[in-house]
Image (cartoon, grey):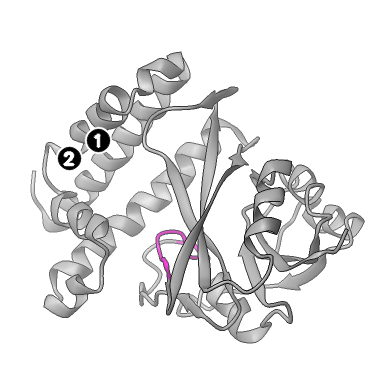
Amino acid sequence: MTLLPITIVVPTRNEERNLDACLSRLGSFAETWVVDSRSTDGTRAIADRHGARWIDFDWSGDFPKKRNWVLANHPPATPWVLFLDADERLTDAFVAELRQALAGERPEVGFWLNYTNHFMGRVLRHGVPQRKLALFRVGAGHYERIDDKRWSNLDMEVHEHPMLDGAIGEIKSPIDHLDFRGIDHYIARHNAYASWEAKRHADLMTRGDAAWAALTPRQRTKYRNLSRWWFAPAYFAGTYFLKLGFLDGGAGFHHAFLKMLYFYEIRLKILGARGDA
C-alpha cells in the first residue's frame, strides 16, 4: 500500500517508556522524525531501531520553541506534517480515515484530531474531550508566537496553537493517548504548565485589545476567569457531572479532581505573583 505523504514529527525528552509503542504504529507514513531535547535515557536507541530520522534540539530560551523551530529549520519534503507526542498511539481506524481524507484534491490545510485519554489504567470515555490541530499542510502556517521569556522550562509549544490560513477539517477516529511515566510525572508536568499559564495571564493583563482579539473564544474565556475563585470548581462540575465523567468510575473522578487542582494552582500562582491572598 502506498505510504501516506505525511512526515510524523515526534518531539522527545527521555521518552524510552513511551516511544517504542508510538513508533511501532507509523509504518504507513512517508517519514518519521524524532526531534529530541538531549535525552539521557534509551530514547535514541529506540528511534534508531525504528529507522526514524534523529534531530537534536537545544532551546535558546527564546522563540522559537521545538515545533516552530523544526518547521523553520527542517521543513518536511512531504505535503503534510503531523506532530505526534511520544505518549500517543495511532490506531488502524485513524490511519484508514486519514488515508481516505487525503485521497484526491482537498481544500483543507489542516485537520483537528481527536484523542482517547487513558488514565490510571482505564479509558476515559467521558469528560471534556481532547482534540488538537496537529496535522496540517507544510507551509500553511506555524504555531502562534508567544514571547514567554522562559516562563517555564517547557521547550516545546504546549498551549500555543497552529495559525493556519485556510479551511480546517476533522479526523473523527481518535488517537490513543496514554503515558506510562506515572502520576509523579503527570503532576510535575502540570505544575510546569500552571507556571506558564499564570505568567501568560499576567502578560495578557498588560496588553491591549489586539492581543485579546487574537485569542480564540475559549482562550478569552479561560484567561479572563483563571484568577476567579469559581473557575476551578466550575471546571470540575462541568467535566465530572455535565460531561458525565462520573461514568468513568474512580479514574474519572481522579482525573477531573487533578484537573481542578491544576486550575486552582494556576489561580494561586496568579494571586501569589500579585501579592494577593
Residue extent of the magenta highlight: 153-162
Q: Is residue 175 magenta?
A: no
- Which residue is rendered at x = 81% and y = 57% of the image? 28
From the image, tell me which residue sits under label 2: 231
Q: Is residue 160 magenta?
A: yes
Q: Is residue 137 above or below residue 258?
A: below
Q: How many marks overall?
A: 2
Q: State which quadrant residue 40 falls in.
A: bottom right
What residue type is disc 1 on? Tyr
Q: Secondary structure at mark 2?
A: helix
Q: Is residue 47 above or below residue 74?
A: above
Tell me the quadrant of the picture where the C terminus can be found.
Answer: top left
Coordinates of residue 234 in the picture (x, y in percent): 19, 33
- Which residue is rendered at x = 22% and y = 61% of the image? 201
Q: Main secondary structure of the magenta part?
A: loop
> Residue pushed farthest left?
276
From the image, tell me which residue sits under label 1: 235
